[in-house]
Amino acid sequence: FNADYTFAQPPFTPTLTAIPGDGRVVLSWDTLALASFDRFSQEFDFEGFRLYKGTDPLLSDSRTITNVDGTPTFFKPIGQWDLANGISGPRTVLGGEGVYNMGNDTGLSFYFVDEDVRNGVPVYYALVAYDRGIINEQTGKVEIDPQENVFNVSVDQLGKVVGLSQNAAVVIPRSRSAGLVDGGSNEDLSTVTQGIGSGSIDVQIIGDDLLDPDGVYQMRFFSEPVVPTDLYNTTDYEIFKVSENRMVVGRSPLVDVSPLIDGFVVEINNVDFESRQIVYNPDNFGYVDNAGTANETLNLDPTQLDGVQTNWVASVELDRSPSFAVSPDDYELRWVDPADSTYTPPRTPSPLFVREPIPIFGVNVQKNAVTELWVEDGNADRQFGPEDVLIFSERGVTGRKFRHRVSFTIPDGQQSIPPSPGDVLRVSVLREFATGDMFQFTTKSSSVDADSARNVLDDVAVVPNPYVGASEMETRTQVDGRGERRIQFINLPTPSTIRIFNLRGELVNTLRHEGGTNNTCTQDAGGCGGSIYWNLQTVDKQDVAFGVYVYHVEAPGVGEHVGKFALVK
């Protein structure tokens, strides 16, 4: 140490958040590990995450991967996410005695839902970040094994959790409170609040109890141009909390799902320009009716629209000439009075193109600029008609660029009714999120609806029923004796009072269920979500006798419920 000896180090330890629900546990973690710099290898060597799960504090039931001698050495993860960088598959470690799975190039995630759980039964989790180790590029031999974080769950002699490392969690899935109405966001997030992107986002509520009832958020995007094309790629995003004037997720590389924020995650559904191909947007394409209003409609067949009189049915395709260039912009054909036409025929006379003015001009919607139009004279009559083809053309630094070809047909048996001044035909494409694109949304917390709770009062129950000697909900102990006994009342309204009587009508104990919050449930919690434990003791802390008992649930403003349960030796 005094000689400043440097060891290979694992990535920064991530912080794991576990939120219990009804029959599921939602886990999320931060992005700190991605910024890990290994002083030994002198590189940013983070590679991925592994998630472990167990039914005891040591997660012993998941330590099933052995070395060559059959000794359990590694934990088997229930989930693994690694960088899509070509580093994948098994790697020999421990001097050839073991094998470590580097992943499958799945890409990273910061969110996982475990539905393989049982209400009332404690579950232990640990999330570790691991690096890529060091391989000799000349010999291919592993010089330094991949390093991963350690984790710790400390319990006392009674089995109670007294300490956790930041990458470990213990939770107890619980039933929901009766009549619980989920919190969430009511905004339509299928289109951007501001900007040009065609993608959408979904706000997924993970922990109702963590939601800000008046939270206002903005998700903002950033992009970079793809030189030398006119396209761009979405690169980063950030989330700003407007209601508190603070950044909750700083500018970060684009992901599919954001980290957990105030009880929710954001799923990002972006358009992919990777193929450098344009995809037309069917929802924003065609003749425009009721333009700019809430009930704006579009259709390539104008006969399907009430506000458009023409019968010229349009079709659009990309121009495939050598001068074609992909553009992420939308374009419009706008019909005007012939005197207002901006059409200029090609300088070189050609029978291929209409020579006379046409009552149309083209517009690049995003740039708010007039485009050139080329008109192919389909029937060589030198006049513009439905047999001709319109081509959007723009001039760039490298010369002329053709965009889209628009052609028309007339339904069989009908006379031509050309578009009138004021008619608009829009050509729209799907676009990635660009710099300046933004979604704004608000959140509201969950609440309890008394009428709904009243309708499900009969769902209140005791588990296990009957109780036969023991229950899987009981914690393990390191001292002599069987430890605390437990049953659980489930599907309770919040708040409520549970009174327990023996068959002689004598009051044995009274439990008060205040609901608490699911995310604060710990191993020995009494009343969380819609559940509360009873330790099978009287109000004087004496163990009760085996037999049949009656319970009475009273919920103010909701109603009452009576049931019974049995305790069997």
Image (cartoon, helix red, strand yellow):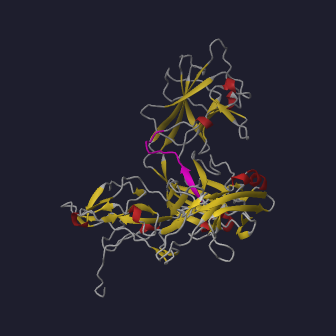
Q: Position of residue 218 (x, y in %)?
A: 63, 58
User: Which residue, as the protein is rendered here, is positioned at the far left?
Assistant: 139
Q: Nearer the viewer, residue 195 or 391?
A: 195
Q: Nearer the viewer, residue 199 or 229?
A: 199
Residue at 47%, 38% in the rendered image: 400
Q: Is residue 7 shown in magenta? A: no
Q: Is residue 193 left or right of residue 133?
A: right
Q: Is residue 463 left or right of residue 256?
A: right
Residue at 65%, 51% in the rendered image: 193
Q: Position of residue 72 (x, y in %)?
A: 32, 64
Q: Is residue 135 left or right of residue 173?
A: left
Residue 443 shows in the view: no
Q: Position of residue 402 (x, y in %)?
A: 49, 35
Residue at 61%, 64% in the rendered image: 487
In which quarter of the view is residue 537 placed? bottom right
Range covered by the magenta-colored residues? 264-277
Residue 508 shows in the view: yes
User: How many marks can you see?
Assistant: 0
Indicate the quadrant containing the C terminus: top left, top right, bottom left or bottom right: bottom right
